């Protein structure tokens, strides 16, 4: 009895200490959640960055970023054009699952990314993040499909591509309006001066970083450039040896530099994941040494520059040829943000967080990757070093006699897809053809 009486009196103090410890743990968990920035350019090719072999212009800030994290040489997007690529990035699912796999959305389109889709923004918002979309949306301009209804707290930008500004579609006799510019759901401007789009998006991003709250943030910065028509601000016009295109890329590099500078000034660079990539291959730029360009399922249409940094957690100075795609970002962010994806949702990407933290000690599993053409049909499949082209709608010699011949390429030894080795490896052709046909997104569903 003598021992239990003092213990009983101390119980409230013990309980209070337990509660304080729990609160401290909760705060610690929140603070440990990294901020996330996805810096997404439009139509920037594989070789349109200094560290990937750019010629005629310099990208010092992004090159420096590459030295501070992981640079990927086998980084892919799930589509050859804007809308489906963005759908894949934000959902972690092949665009076909969202019925956004054919062409792109236009100012006369009635559809968009279904609000039933679970987006990266919704996932991170559920995990306690503030979420912002800055720049180009291009997943539906009707209210139901706009960013504020897709998990984003704030939106600052335009609903579709800059070439749709006041464009006349003669085939359907449709005159699109001047390019709308929104802040959230409020239209703040029509037909903005496109020379200043990159600067405006950058200034808004920096402003949000400097005026953030106590919770972690997710910023999806989707620049319009270097999609045509090309525009650079007066400060960058004439700066490169590559003409206006080089000027535009140099301004995008400046944008990345300003954002990184703001993160460092705020003391949060060390706890921010920064992803740099492009939505598809180039229209005006370079994908060298890859074959093909935007809208084509050759490597140049879907293999893009990819850099991921998280100082102190992701090792610096790593260059890897491991296969990764933007489909992997959503499940990876789920793990790194200490949250989860609803089990009923079919995700096509995979969590690569363990690899990011230990790229020299981890190998990613071999997995198939499907290449859908602009017309929505499956044209190719990759597994490991092998890529099989089953059909081709554009980007080959259409004037040649006959139809496109099934082609197999060894990407490890033939990155430019120049030597068809299908006849030398019939077993690989058979295996990959079967995988494509058996896929739940494959050839047998092409008319769905």
Image (spheres, rainbow, N blue to C red):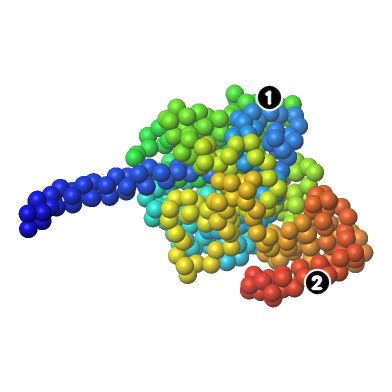
The span from disc 1 to disc 2 (Cα, nearest Å) is 52 Å
Which-is-in-front pick, marks 1 and 2? 2
Q: Which residue is tagged 2?
A: 430
* Helix, strand or loop status at disc 2: helix
The residue at the point 48 percent across, 50 percent down is 336
Can residue 89 be seen?
no
The residue at the point 68 percent across, 60 percent down is 366
Name above or below for residue 381 compared with residue 147. below
The residue at the point 40 percent across, 32 percent down is 210
Tag shown at residue 95: none
Q: Tag count in the figure?
A: 2
- Residue 13 drawn at (x, y percent): 15, 47
The residue at the point 56 percent across, 34 percent down is 256
* Helix, strand or loop status at disc 1: loop
Can residue 123 be seen?
yes
Taking depth in this image into account, of 288 and 337 the one nearest to the observer is 337
Q: Which residue is tagged 1?
A: 238
Of the 4 image quadrants, the one containing the N terminus is bottom left
- Residue 106 drawn at (x, y percent): 59, 55
- Residue 114 drawn at (x, y percent): 49, 63
- Residue 419 drawn at (x, y percent): 88, 55
Hey, which residue is sitting farthest front in the picture? 2
Disc with the residue nearer the chain's start (1 vs 2)? 1
Of the 4 image quadrants, the one containing the C terminus is bottom right
Crowd around label 1: few <14 · some 14–19 · many ≥20 (10 Å): some
Taking depth in this image into account, of 263 and 155 the one nearest to the observer is 263
């Amino acid at each position: 009895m003598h021992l239990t009486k003092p213990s009983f009196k101390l119980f409230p103090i013990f309980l209070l200490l337990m509660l304080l410890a729990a609160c401290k743990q909760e705060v610690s968990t929140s603070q440990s959640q990294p901020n996330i920035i996805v810096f997404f350019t439009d139509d920037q090719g594989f070789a349109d960055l200094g560290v990937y072999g750019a010629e005629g212009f310099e990208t010092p800030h992004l090159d420096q970023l590459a030295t501070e994290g992981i640079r990927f040489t086998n980084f892919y997007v799930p589509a050859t054009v804007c809308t489906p690529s963005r759908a894949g990035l934000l959902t972690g699912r092949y665009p076909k699952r969202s019925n956004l796999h054919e062409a792109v959305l236009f100012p006369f389109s009635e559809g968009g990314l279904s609000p039933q889709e679970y987006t990266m923004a919704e996932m991170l918002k559920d995990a306690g993040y503030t979420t912002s979309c800055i720049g180009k949306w291009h997943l539906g301009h009707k209210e139901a499909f706009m960013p504020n209804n897709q998990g984003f707290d704030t939106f600052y930008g335009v609903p579709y591509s800059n070439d749709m500004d006041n464009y006349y579609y003669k085939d359907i006799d449709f005159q699109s309006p001047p390019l709308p510019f929104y802040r959230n759901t409020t239209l703040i401007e029509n037909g903005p001066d496109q020379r200043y789009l990159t600067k405006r998006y950058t200034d808004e991003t920096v402003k949000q970083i400097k005026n953030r709250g106590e919770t972690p943030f997710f910023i999806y910065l989707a620049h319009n450039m270097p999609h045509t028509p090309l525009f650079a601000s007066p400060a960058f016009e004439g700066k490169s040896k590559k003409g206006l295109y080089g000027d535009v890329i140099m301004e995008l590099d400046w944008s990345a530099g300003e954002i990184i500078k703001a993160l460092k000034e705020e003391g949060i660079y060390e706890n921010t994941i920064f992803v740099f990539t492009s939505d598809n291959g180039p229209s005006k730029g370079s994908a060298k040494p890859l074959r093909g360009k935007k809208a084509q399922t050759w490597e140049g249409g879907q293999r893009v520059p990819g850099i991921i940094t998280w100082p102190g957690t992701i090792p610096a100075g790593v260059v890897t040829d491991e296969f990764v795609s933007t489909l992997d970002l959503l499940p990876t962010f789920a793990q790194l943000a200490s949250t989860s994806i609803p089990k009923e949702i079919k995700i096509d990407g995979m969590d690569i967080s363990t690899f990011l933290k230990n790229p020299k000690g981890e190998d990613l599993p071999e997995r198939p990757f499907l290449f859908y053409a602009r017309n929505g049909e499956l044209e190719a499949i990759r597994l490991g070093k092998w890529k099989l082209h089953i059909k081709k709608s554009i980007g080959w010699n259409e004037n040649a006699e006959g139809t496109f011949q099934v082609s197999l390429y060894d990407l490890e030894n033939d990155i430019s897809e120049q030597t068809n080795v299908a006849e030398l490896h019939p077993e690989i052709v058979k295996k990959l053809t079967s995988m494509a046909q058996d896929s739940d997104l494959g050839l047998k569903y092409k008319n769905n």
